[in-house]
Amino acid sequence: YSTESETTLKHNLAWLVGKHELSGGFSLKNSRFDHDIFSDADTVYTYDTDFADAKQDTVTGVFRTYPEWNDEHKVSTLKSAAYAQLRLNPTDRLTLRLGGRYEHMEYTGHGHFAPRLGLRYRLSDTLWLNGAYGVHYQSPSYLMLTVHPENKDLDSYYTNQVVLGTEWLPRSD
């Protein structure tokens, strides 16, 4: 069996200054994970497969044996994050967003900064051109982190994401 639960405290703020906005926030997440996983002993055999009919395959030896295995963990860890974003409107047609997010996971000791950039250009009252770049991180699953002692050093997965697109409204509102 395995159970996971999280308790989160979050706060977000935004300040408007004319046409511009500065926003930010944080989150503190207490994550709890308990698992008790087991596997019976098992054996993997080698076979002679030189026959046209699979029913004639014969065991030729033992490739590997696995002993009974049991893993039980109870983990509680703190995940923290903070972000800031600045939205600028240098012209009536252009919106620029600059931001970043920092995340830290107590259990692994790893922390990462993830920059973000976004542009939005209004071509008409109903058509916009959008573009964005960002780095996004995701921690390995709790099961993956705790199933083997060496996995505690696993780092987060990440992706560099680029998005280009258009936005069209059938009519202006």
Image (tube, rainbow, N blue to C red):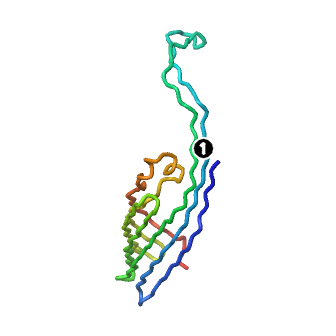
- Mark 1 belongs to which amino acid? Ile
Q: Is residue 161 above or below residue 14?
A: above
Farthest left residue in view:
90
Query: Residue at the spot x=39%, y=63% of the render?
Result: 111
- Judging by the rendered image, the residue that carries numbered circle 1 is 37
In the image as oriented, which residue stretches furthest toward the bottom?
18
Q: Is residue 155 above or below residue 79?
A: above
Residue 147 position within the rendered picture, expressed as x and y whole percent measured from the top left: 52, 46
Which of the 4 image quadrants contains residue 161? Answer: bottom left
Q: What's the residue at 57%, 14% (across, down)?
A: 54
Residue 116 position (above or below residue 160): below
- Tell me the quarter of the picture where residue 16 sits: bottom left
* 63 or 57: nearer the viewer: 63
Residue 4's quadrant in the figure? Answer: bottom right
Q: What element does badge 1 sit on?
A: strand
Q: Is residue 154 left or right of residue 37?
A: left
* Left or right side of 70 for 97: left
Q: Tag 1: Cα neighbours inside 10 Å, few (<14), some, or many (≥20)?
A: some
Q: Measured along the vertical axis of the image, is residue 168 above or below residue 53?
A: below
Q: Position of residue 52 (x, y in %)?
A: 54, 10
Picture residue at 49% right of the left edge, 65% below the top? 79
Classify the position of the C terminus by image quarter: bottom right
> In front here: 116 or 63?
63
- Measured as percent of width and height from the top left, residue 37 is found at 60, 44
